Every structure is written in C-alpha cells, then in structure tokens.
Image (cartoon, grey):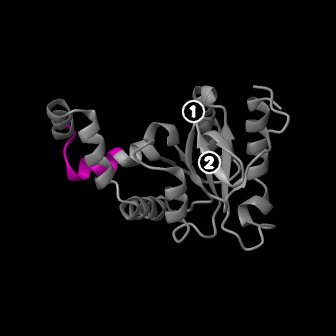
Amino acid sequence: MTIEERLDALEETIQSEEFLQGRGLGNEVPFWIFDYPPEKELLIRSRIPKLKENLKLKSVNILEIDLYELCLEIVTVIVPMQRILQFESDNGSDKLFEKLRLMLDPEDIQRTIKKKIDDFGDVNIIIVTGVGKAWPLVRSHSILNNLQPVVDVMPLILFYPGKYSGLDLSLFGKFKDGNYYRAFRLVDDSAIDS
C-alpha cells in the first residue's frame, strides 16, 4: 500500500461512526497514530487541509493542532520573539534550547490544547501535526500522556514522521522518542510501498 493509498484509507476510516464513537477499543482512550516515512512530510502537509475540507463537507469537524506552532504560541506569550532571537544571538542555540524546554511545561501545553478545544466548539476529531518540527522541544509520548485527561472520548490522531511499533515511537526512524502503548496504529502499512 502506498502512502497515498494509506491516506485515502485514513480518510475513509475516520469518517465512520465506529471511529467517531470510539467503538471497539475496549475502554481505551481513542488515541491513534498515523506513522509515515519522514521523507513524505510535505505530502502529508499538503493532504491535511484537503482531508479537513472533505470531512467538513460530511459534518465531521477536525481541530488541527500543530505542535510547533503551539510551542511558539506558548513561548511568545512569555517572551517576545525579538528577545528570543537576541538571546540566541548572545548565548547560542544550545542555551536557547535549554531555556525553551523549561518554558514548555507539559501542563502548559495541556492547558493550551484544552483551551483550543473549548474555543473551537464542536470538535469531532483532533489531529496533531508538526511533531517533527517541534522535536526535541517536546516529545510525542509526553504530549499523549498529558492529553489523556483532556481528550478522553473524542478521537485524537497524531501524524508521526517515523515509526510506531504499538509499544514505542521512533522519530524519523532514528531517534527513540519514548515508549507509548496506549495508542493504536491507524491504517496498517504492512504492505507499504513508499
């Protein structure tokens, strides 16, 4: 199955009543991971707006949360972007990275996502993108763990540039992103043909 075929299958799967109601999950949180080869990132980015538009026509409302944009939003509320850039110029990227990680507390991320859900209104599905752009500031398994209390009944799909084994995440197929076993793989790629 090609990545394009998997994306088509994803669109078909997530508009089903069973998916939207979280049936058949055995009381597990309805967290799904759509993993894909990192070199297909631009294809994924181009397909997500089309996916959202197609499903909106079928009365399925999708809230997209780009982790990278979310991180920028949280950080720039605390410190203006100009000061961040000046800090990096004065102290280097490694020091900036240390400061930014401290500012991106998982509870702040959780609170910000909760507010986005509440502000959006009628949400049927949450999709999380920008995982690769936000790494290593935030880790996927940490985000998923912290979202369980916030998103307990509506499906959440994490678009993941790497591999999810069902037990652990490997970002870009190179970096161990952490163990996570509560999500389900969405659209098997056992016969994938990149």
Where, by quadrant of the figure, is residue 112 drawn?
A: bottom left
Q: Which residues are magenta?
A: 72-81
Q: Which residue is found at the position 17% from the left and 37% from the top?
A: 87
Mark 1 closeness class: few <14, some 14–19, many ≥20 residues within 10 Å: few
Which residue is denoted by mark 2 in the rendering?
169
**Amino acid of disc 2:** Leu
Residue 49 position, x and y percent, is: 58, 37
Q: Quadrant of the C terminus?
A: top right
Q: Secondary structure at mark 1?
A: helix
Q: Is residue 187 above or below residue 19?
A: above
Q: Which mark is residue 187?
A: none
> Residue at 75% of width from left, 59% of height from top?
19
Query: Residue 45 has which mark?
Result: 1
For numbered disc 2, what is the local secondary structure? strand
User: What residue lies at 60% left-to-right and 49% top-to-bottom?
Assistant: 158
Q: CA gap, disc 2 to disc 1?
A: 20 Å
